[in-house]
Amino acid sequence: MSIFSWGAKGAAEGTPGSLLDQKHLSQIVDDLRDGVVAYDQNYKILVFNRAAEQILGLKASEVVGQSFTLKIREGGSTARFRILLTLLFPALAQMIVRRSEPGAYPQVVDISFEEPPLELRVTTNKMTDAQGKVIGFVKLIHDRTRELTLLRSKSEFIAIASHQLRTPLSGLNWALEGLKNESLSGSEKELVVQAIAAVNRLRKISEDLLDVAKIEEGKFGYNFQEFDIVPFLENTLAQAKSVASQYRVRVFLEPPKEGSLTTIGDPQKLSLVIANLTDNAIKYNIPNGEVIVSVERLKDKPFIHVSVRDTGIGIPPEELKKAFTKFFRAANAVKVAVEGTGLGLYIAKNIIRRHGGEIWVESTPNRGSTFHFTLPTNPTLIPAKEYVYEED
Ligand code: ADP
């Protein structure tokens, strides 16, 4: 029996002279490497290709023509259909990350299962009749389990390597600090100071690499708690003071009208975000420039909004799209600050996403940039689990 059981029209029915008849179309769908599941509005399965059989561990013959409802799940014998049911009714998924705007088609979600371990990217589109009436849905299921396993093992290697670098680098730093205090000539001292700066840059690179590796392994480890973001921002900004005066840049905090703002998050991880955004706003600024950090509660949504505005060099418009990708460094930034890992914003984006927030930037070259992020104030908006993030 053909896997196509709905009455397709025109070419699919095999009208003479048509390029593709139904048999060919079935064959193409059946040979796809991604799973294809199509169903009507009553959740009656119409198409279930070979890849879907393999990924979901079911035979087309046992699902095509069957209508699925949420109730089926309650019976003990339906455990085998668990994955299919979760794909049909994503509200059942325990680990799900949306990759597209809610309500917009095609909808893209990543769904993970622990037993058996599966990482699926599911793209859902509507099927419509000639009048545009929705007659069902088609899901394309891409199995990313192997891809993500490889990514995790690569990250594990980087994590171990950067962790191993820590001890000798600390030793080197300790020895150089000792040498600096010895009675050295002016030029010798200068060399030692340069060596200390180089060691510190190496330590920063290895710390950033370690953070990225842990994030990509899904093992960054978050501790969520309620806290007032205002004193938290004051403390984090106080630590940027010496760098700010070195660059002759003034940093201000614009507190919210309410005076205090309680939010939910991991303060240690969020301090990495704030420190990175303010460091950048200082480093890519101009002498006598300003950095203004402001925080407010959003009026109509359960989120707070933090922004870090500067009067610096900005990011060229053609490069803005890449701002949060790994190792990104804009051409104008490389000129003013030769050193930099290009990992800080990538780490920041991962931390904010893990909190259920969004991060974005607006920028005008030679005028300045504003980095924004949101954080939910409602714990149900925080994703249930750390999720391996890849760039999108
Ligand atoms: P790094 O600062 O180590 O290069 P980041 O990931 O923090 O790495 O930033 C990536 C790039 O984004 C920077 O190299 C720079 O090109 C750009 N950038 C970030 N913040 C700013 C800013 N406030 N003003 C201008 N460019 C910025």
Image (cartoon, rainbow, N blue to C red):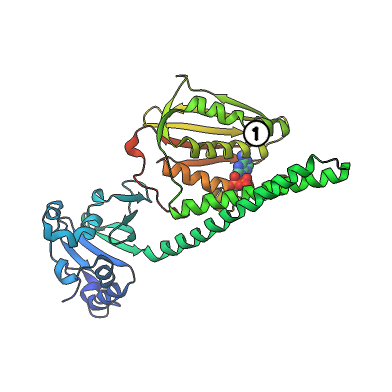
Which residue is found at the position 49% from the left and 45% from the top? 349
- Residue 297 in picture, x, y percent from top left: 43, 27
Q: Is residue 207 visible?
A: yes
- Residue 179 in picture, x, y percent from top left: 78, 44
Q: Is residue 366 visible?
A: no
Q: How busy is the neighbourhood of tag 1: few (under 14 within 10 Å), some, or many (20 plus)? A: many
Element under label 1? loop
**CB of residue at label 1: within 8 Å of ligand 1?**
no
Which residue is found at the position 34% from the left and 64% from the top? 143
Specify whether 290 is left or right of 233: right
**Quarter occupied by residue 132:** bottom left
The foreground one among 169 and 120 is: 169
- Residue 86 in picture, x, y percent from top left: 24, 55
The foreground one among 75 and 206 is: 206
- Residue 128 in picture, x, y percent from top left: 24, 58
Q: Residue at label 1? A: 311
Amino acid type, label 1: Thr
